[in-house]
Amino acid sequence: MSPKAVKKPRDKHFTTILLAAQEEFATHGLKGARMQAIADRADLPKANVHYYFKNKVSLYLAVLDNIIATWDDFLNDVNVDDDPAIALDTFIRAKVRLSFENPTASRLFANEILQGAPYLSNYISEVLRPRVINRTKVIEEWMNAGKMAATDPVLLIFMIWATTQHYADFQAQVLGIMGRKEYDDDLINQVSNFTSQTILRGCGLEPPNTNARGNQ
Amino acid sequence: MSPKAVKKPRDKHFTTILLAAQEEFATHGLKGARMQAIADRADLPKANVHYYFKNKVSLYLAVLDNIIATWDDFLNDVNVDDDPAIALDTFIRAKVRLSFENPTASRLFANEILQGAPYLSNYISEVLRPRVINRTKVIEEWMNAGKMAATDPVLLIFMIWATTQHYADFQAQVLGIMGRKEYDDDLINQVSNFTSQTILRGCGLEPPNTNARGNQ
DNA sequence: ACAAAACCTGTCTAAATGGTCAAGATTTGA
DNA sequence: TCAAATCTTGACCATTTAGACAGGTTTTGT
């Protein structure tokens, strides 16, 4: 994967195109995306895009690769000895921040899943599934140790994903309903606090820092 | 809106096309959808699709109209005298059921919002926003009456939307991670129970029926 | 029964779109 | 310095795609 990236790091255009493609694919999906539109976003002639990427699908795959490589799951280095309230709170806040600050990646991913994950079904079952199962065990150990109420750990993870990514994927709706023009830091904190508090309480946990401002 | 639907209710093809278009638009978005693919799904010649709908955009709008007309918001006829736990529980269960049983509509909507809601921005600000504000007031009255803990009602509604629609929009991911082939009734109940319980507890409410099987 | 209206569809067209190519510009290494 | 390698791009092509249309069939009202 990542066709030419290996060869020469000197080509800045490679990254530019990848970024432009990410935006175009995020808003229009694979079929809806136009190579010309990607070229326009990158401010390059279309033929130049084709010099770096053989065709639309390979560019799409390169973008997916690039996004996935960026995602190390924040919940990953958590173990039984950690405090579940702090671990989940940290995870939720990181996810909310990501949604607000880098919504395109989330949207592209959403678009791909929406279409039935034709190019990610393997990644989901081979990478994501084992990882979730793994995290599930930690949560179960927390529950067995009486550190939190008994619930379904998988559905809990889905809930965290759903609520946090919602602010990236449905930004247009959130802004429209709130009567706002754009996101700001206040909203990040408000959403972080609400989401963390509600979900933690929902699991019988006491939220760590109830007050405002949650960096990290 | 709904170009020819007014004239004659006799044309069953109209509905067939609408349904076929809904599926195609739900998976590929407006730009990604192909008129030929819609015709194929409807098992009709493409020219026949064009007989009923002037062009792609008008068909897309008709589909959106059709979906929106179907959605009466379940939380709509709820007032201060109702028990918030029962009202929210009922709402959540209805939403989960809708996600499992009619995912296409949810996906089409998601696709439109993902693209920045170009054809729904007006609906969001003129219809959805007032409705949310209206429901917000009821929730606030519940909080003032000490019937539930104080939280942000708008974010609460977002959370319910996000968690329930997740099972429609991200079906491919949910199935992949759970290692399943398809949804079944057990999962509907499991998700309904988990979602209702977690969110209600998150708002300081006691979930009404904790045990399994929650129809309606 | 029959004309008008509504409906159906094979065929066609103009535009959009993904992708190629060859010729030129620039960079690189020796 | 200069040739090979890499990069850039305008022009071009083949295919796909949205949509038009004319001539046919069926339905409808009287």
Image (spheres, coloured by chain):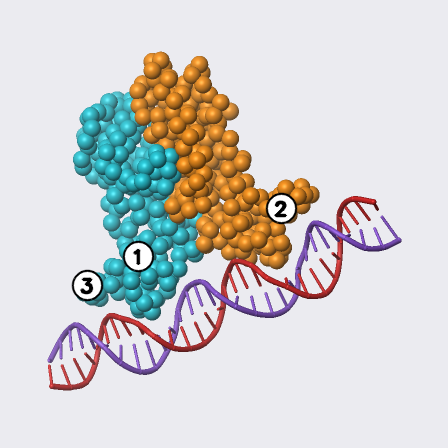
Chain colours: A cyan, B orange, C purple, D red
Q: Of residues B190 and B117, which is closer to you in this image?
A: B117
Q: Secondary structure at mark 3?
A: loop
- Where residue B152 appears, as percent x and y from the top left, is 32, 26
Q: CA distance from mark 2 to mark 3?
A: 58 Å
* Residue mark closest to the camera, 1 vs 3: 1
Q: Amino acid at mark 3?
A: Pro
Q: Are callouts 1 and 3 both on one chain?
A: yes
Residue that appears at 53% across and 44% down: B63
Q: Within 10 Å of the Cα at label 3, are there few (<14), some (14-19), or many (20+) other Cα atoms?
A: few
Q: Of residues B213 and C2, which is closer to you in this image?
A: C2
Q: Amino acid at mark 1?
A: Ala
Question: Which quadrant of the figure has residue D4?
Answer: bottom left
Residue at image mark 2: B4
Residue at image mark 3: A9
Question: Which quadrant of the figure has residue A90?
Answer: top left
Q: Within 10 Å of the Cα at label 2, are there few (<14), some (14-19), or many (20+) other Cα atoms?
A: few
Determine whether B76 is above or below A97 in the image: above
Chain designation of label 1: A
Q: CA distance from mark 2 to mark 1?
A: 41 Å
Residue that appears at 35% across and 50% down: A26
Determine whether A81 is above or below B32 in the image: above
Q: Is residue B5 left or right of residue A8?
A: right
Residue at image mark 1: A20
* Residue mark closest to the camera, 2 vs 3: 2
